[in-house]
Image (tube, grey):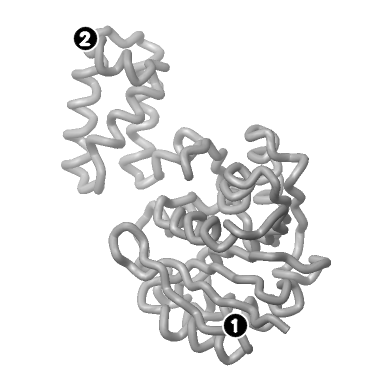
Amino acid sequence: MTTRDHAMRMLAHRLKEAGLPTPALDARILVQAATGASDIEMIREPGTLMTRAEEERLAGWERRRLAREPVSRILGSREFWGLPFTVTAETLDPRADSETLVETALDLLKDIERPRLLDLGTGTGCLLLSLLHERQDAVGTGVDLSEGALAVAASNASALGLSARAQFIESEWTENVEGRFDLAVSNPPYIPHGDIAGLAGEVRLHDPMLALDGGEDGLDAYRALARLLPDHLTQGGHAVVELGAGQADAVTAIFEAAGFGLSRIVPDLAGVPRALVAAWPRA
């Protein structure tokens, strides 16, 4: 038997030796989850012995992490915008960079009462549900082509107490969507098809291909969104879409060619261009 602290240090060492990017953080999260310890207990009681069942659980999780399975998928949950979201093989793993879209959208909505929101490619529902959590006067629709992802999003809405203000629709983009919305958000598939084989194992082996593959040049989804959104945005409404690396200029051109107003690019905390804001002109 070993202590929590010793198990955490040894696991971090093995993960580091394997070349994993955040070994200490991963080790702490996995040991804490395996033991059920609180944050305070992890700090105040590092010498607590782990039970045999906890050690076996941790050993199984270590094997999975060494095989490049993300911690969030091992545990089935990811925190996003300070909220817990269930993650499954049917959904993209929410990433902190995408919180840039939430922050940007909230700023655009600050002067709009009872806004209607549309989330295209909703996955776990993290974008839509984070916005609804912040704006208690808002209602929203999440759209996805994956029936499994929609079930996860609906479950997350229920767990967060947001089911009454969120609906989820199975649709290829806006095909089954009715009405107009004050703001649309989307984290679309934007990886060029030929680049997928070179992605990190955590992404390539575990994120659904439907949420990754953006076509030959990675821009197929942006072309579809720019073509379809004008029929579903209010006059003066906005689209906020996540950008892939090096795509800002190309995506801006696509939206401007579709008639959207002056776009702006919002960087994430690392300074990487992350969100494009496109305004649909007022009448």
Seen at 41% across and 84% down, the residue is 249
Secondary structure found at label 1? helix
**Where does the image place residue 239, in percent across and percent down from the top left?**
59, 70
Seen at 79% across and 66% down, the residue is 177
Q: Nearer the viewer, residue 90 or 249?
A: 249
Q: Nearer the viewer, residue 148 or 177?
A: 177
Numbered mark located on residue 167 in the image: none
User: Whole-Å distance between the Cαs marked 1 and 2?
Assistant: 56 Å
Mark 2 surroundings within 10 Å by alpha-carbon count, few (fewer than 14), some (14 through 19), many (20 or more): few
**Where does the image place residue 248, in percent across and percent down from the top left?**
42, 79
Does residue 82 appear to the left or right of 201 in the view shown? right
Secondary structure found at label 2? loop
Does residue 6 appear to the left or right of 120 in the view shown? left
- Is residue 130 at all visible to an observer of this figure? yes
**Pointer 1 residue:** 223
Residue 121 location, quadrant: bottom right
Tell me if residue 217 comes above or below residue 39 in the rendering: below
Mark 1 surroundings within 10 Å by alpha-carbon count, few (fewer than 14), some (14 through 19), many (20 or more): some
Tell me if residue 11 comes above or below residue 268 in the rendering: above
**Where does the image place residue 214, in percent across and percent down from the top left?**
52, 74
Q: In which quarter of the image is the N terminus?
A: top left
Tell me if residue 29 comes above or below residue 141 in the rendering: above
Seen at 23% across and 35% down, the residue is 24
Seen at 34% across and 35% down, the residue is 63
**Pointer 2 residue:** 47
Q: Decide which of tag 1 and tag 2 comes sooner along the chain.
A: 2
Q: In which quarter of the image is the C terminus?
A: bottom right
Q: Residue furthest front?
A: 111
User: Nearer the viewer's eye, disc 1 or disc 2?
Assistant: 1
Three-letter amino acid code at the position of disc 2: Gly
**Where does the image place residue 196, in percent across and percent down from the top left?**
42, 69
Three-letter amino acid code at the position of disc 1: Arg
